[in-house]
Amino acid sequence: MHQGRQWRAAGQDHLFCSTKAHARRIEEIFDKLYPQYKGELAKVLVSDDSRVYGKGGLLDQFTNNDMPRVAISVDMLDTGIDVREIVNLVFASRSTPTPSSGR
């Protein structure tokens, strides 16, 4: 049985998505690629989710714990938070392919 890919041990990652639907889709992709983490590797952090705030909330977990290692946010965390080492910072947005100029 395929156990999924292995995630590197050090640091955390942060993805900024364009919409909540986009963020949820990215979370689903992480869950599918890394099933051995049982949905704990990547978490969506959005301001209208009460699970984000307070002691033991998702933001607190991302700041102080080993999991989640990937924070996926929309219009949040852009003012800065104290976390351990950030390995990857990704700004994901929709893009429209443009034809090459054919020079």
Image (cartoon, helix red, strand yellow):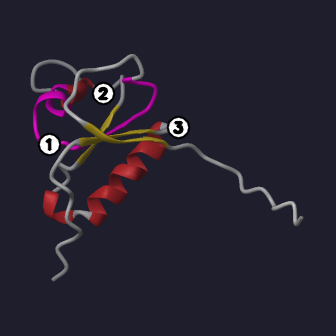
Label 3: element kind: loop
Q: SS of the residue at dot 1?
A: loop
Instruction: Say which residue label 3 marks.
Output: 18
Q: Give the amino acid at mark 1.
A: Met
Residue 83 image point, x, y percent = 22, 27
Q: Distance between the residues labelled 3 and 2?
A: 17 Å
- Kind of residue sitting beneath label 2: Asp
Instruction: Tell me the number on the disc at residue 7.
Output: none
Residue, disc 1: 67
| Residue 4 appears left or right of 72 | left
Foreground tag (1 vs 3): 1
- Image quadrant in which the C terminus is located: bottom right
Q: What is the C-alpha distance between the residues marked 2 and 1?
A: 18 Å
Residue plotted at (78% across, 56% down): 98
Q: Position of residue 1 (x, y in %)?
A: 15, 83
Q: What's the magenta region?
A: 60-77
For marks 1 and 3, give the CA distance: 23 Å
**Which class describes the residues within 10 Å of circle 1: few (<14), some (14-19), or many (20+)?**
some
Q: Is 49 in front, or is 68?
A: 68
Res 49 label: 2
